[in-house]
Amino acid sequence: MDWTRDTIRLYLDDRLLNETKLKDTRNPDGKMPFRQPHYMILNLALGGDNGGPLPESSLPAKFEIDWVRVYQTKP
């Protein structure tokens, strides 16, 4: 993900999947959610309404993250 002052771009293996212009993300109350402070959560979500029930044979599960890179440009 590249998050700049103007856009958020999502990539997978260096291929651009989606681009959103931040000026288009204004909520009905006028607030711009992507101009607020944020934090990152890395989560292994299993099952649920969208994923359905999990077979017992799939647990326990292992969540391995190879690397995460966070960087910030100078203002």
Image (cartoon, rainbow, N blue to C red):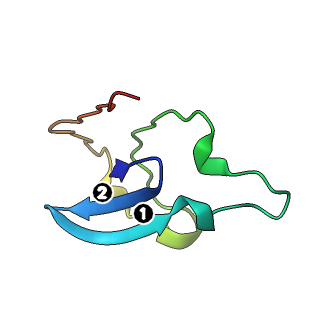
The residues bearing labels 2 and 1 have C-alpha atoms spaced at a distance of 7 Å
Q: Is residue 52 visible?
A: no
Would you say the residues marked 2 and 1 are in contact, meaning their CB atoms lie under 8 Å apart?
yes
49 vs 62: above or below: below
Q: Nearer the viewer, residue 4 or 47?
A: 4
Is 31 situated left or right of 14 in this image?
A: right
- 44 sits to left or right of 33: left
Outermost top residue: 74
Q: Position of residue 64 (x, y in %)?
A: 21, 39
Considering every residue shown, the one lying at the far front of the view is 75
The residue to which callout 1 is attached is 54
Q: Residue at x 31, y 44 (%)?
A: 60
Q: Amino acid at mark 2?
A: Ser
Q: Which mark is residue 16?
A: none
Q: Position of residue 58 (x, y in %)?
A: 30, 57
Quarter of the image for residue 66 reads top left
Which residue matches tag 2? 58
**Which residue is rendered at x = 39% and y = 46% of the image?**
44
